[in-house]
Amino acid sequence: MWCVSVVISQYEPYGENVAYSKATNQSTTLGVLNASLGVDGNVSTKDGACSHTGVKQTYSWWTVDLAGFYFIKFIRIYQWTRDNVNRLNGSQMYAKGTDNTWKQINFNSNWPSSVFNVSVDLNKPIGEIMLNNSVWQGEAAFICVCELQAFTVTVCELFLNIPNNSREISTPGIAGNNTYNATITVECNEGYNYSLHEMEPLRCASDGSWRGNLGNCNGNSVCGKSGHWNGDIGLCKVIDCGSPLNTP
């Protein structure tokens, strides 16, 4: 009984796969299909490239220690459905946080797919991920992992260089402000105009930097409500043209 791995990437636009090449373990091992094959980044599609627990087991588990705590946005699992057998059928997924307790992650393992995309909304950093299974599938309740990827959320530094005479308008990214795909635009205060004809909003990019150009808000000739020109250009005065001229 063999599994075949799938070509993968260690990066996504919104973060990095922090499970890659980390320490793994599993309850039993089928032949040489050890637990580390599930995070080795191997792009080979040859037989024997996936981890696999042993046969005749009524309960199996597989874990990866992330060697740190990370905010994970989603987890992707590749598995081989050989002979139309879903080797993760009935599996459950758990994550261990900084409080050293396991919390279940919603995971529909019954779907007959070679790729599982699992959204993670725990709102806490994760240090370890576990798959377990007690559903008998002919020979065992086994777990086969061709590759497990755990993607972090890219976070941009707090942006403080908002142009003078303007106010910030922010749109959250995939996990809140300052995370991947978040945007920042500005609105000039009364009496000021943009220095650019077309302002390009800042966007939190995959490398953790802000991309775009907010420009500057420059003063114009608009009289403010206080009776002053914005920018203290001068005092706004009422123009008195005097009495109308007598007409014949």
Image: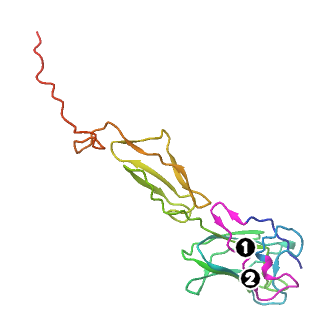
Magenta stretch, residue numbers: 10-37
Residue 22 drawn at (x, y percent): 72, 78
Residue at (85% x, 81% y) in the render: 33
Point out the image quarter for the C terminus: top left
Q: Main secondary structure of the magenta part?
A: loop
Q: What amino acid does circle 2 point to? A: Thr
Residue at (72% x, 66% y) in the render: 10
Front residue of 146 and 167: 167
Residue 245 drawn at (x, y percent): 12, 17
Q: Is residue 173 visible?
A: yes
Q: What amino acid does circle 1 point to? A: Tyr
Give the labeled residue for mark 1.
Answer: 20
Residue 187 drawn at (x, y percent): 41, 48
Q: Is residue 93 visible?
A: no
Mark seen at residue 194: none
Give the labeled residue for mark 2.
Answer: 24
Q: Does the magenta stretch include residue 93?
A: no
Categorize mark 2 by other alpha carbons within 10 Å: few (<14), some (14-19), many (20+): many
Instruction: Tell me: 111 left or right of 200.
Output: right
Q: Find out whether the residues at labels 1 and 2 contact each other: C-beta distance under 8 Å.
A: no
Asked which quadrant contains residue 209, the reply is bottom right
Q: How far apart are marks 1 and 2 (CA)?
A: 10 Å
Instruction: Tell me: 126 left or right of 23.
Output: left
